[in-house]
Amino acid sequence: MTATAHPLQIVAATRARTAANVARDRFAAPETMSALQFIAAHFDAAATACDAYDGTTNAPFMEMWRALADARELITRHKDSRLPAEVIEYVTAPLTASPLPTLPRLLPPSERDAAEEATLRAELDRLHADTEAADADTESWFRAVLAVLAKWKRLEGAVDVDNRRPCNRVRVAELHLKCIACGGSTIRFSVREWAVCECGKGQTWGDALVCDCGYDCPAIRGEAAN
């Protein structure tokens, strides 16, 4: 007797297969094109493994997670793929009952880029809220999500370049840093995990940072370069 796939299983497999097709069809530089083909193969393998689950063993799901981990590694290494690592969470969300992922704030120093980030977030929020479309036509819905994420990755790259410009150092600090005492952003980072504001207040890096960047914060990089 052939087991019938669970609806959530079908949704997860469809999302993985859609991600594979989008990666395979994406145009990029030769090195990235090669990586995209491997990424697509891993997503295809994840979809096939998800399809194979029949309730008798968890082996197919274990294979799916391995394939997705391989896809994530390549996505992380190849920024020009225009795929954020969060794509993996979109694939697994139907199976884990986890909420759809949110993207870290970019905090662009440019007003134009800040407006574009707000527009992309609004569009992604709209797609997340459209659960009817996500269920009725999973492939079209997920292609729309991936198109927004591709624009977001392009914007992320542009913001990273702007954050490294010496002329933007003060503005980047204003967006990413805030002293816990005076609220200022003129903060020097000394030994690991310790920073001192110009007002004299010492604080941990975590206390001083008001962004989502962590230790790779451009404000820290800019301070280290001076």
Image: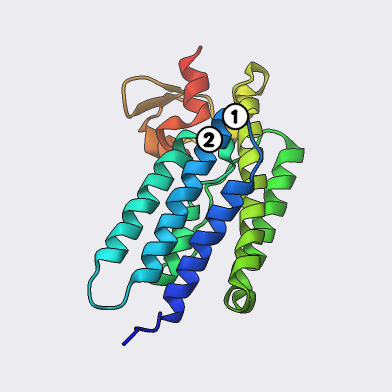
Residue drawn at x 56%, y 60% as measured from the top left: 18
Callout 2–callout 1 Cβ contact below 8 Å: yes
Give the x, y percent position of residue 210.
49, 41
**Figure colour scheme:** rainbow
Let me know if residue 55 appears in the view.
yes
Give the vertical position of 112 relative to 200 (above or below): below
Give the x, y percent position of residue 138.
59, 71
Residue situated in front as seen by the camera: 51 or 129? 51
Q: Which amino acid does label 2 sit on?
A: Ser
Give the vertical position of 101 relative to 153 (above or below): below
Residue drawn at x 40%, y 80% as measured from the top left: 5
Give the x, y percent position of residue 208.
44, 35
Q: Mark 1 points at which residue?
A: 30
Q: Is mark 1 on a helix, strand or loop?
A: helix
Q: Residues within 10 Å of mark 1 (few under 14, many from 20)?
A: few
Q: Is mark 2 on a helix, strand or loop?
A: helix
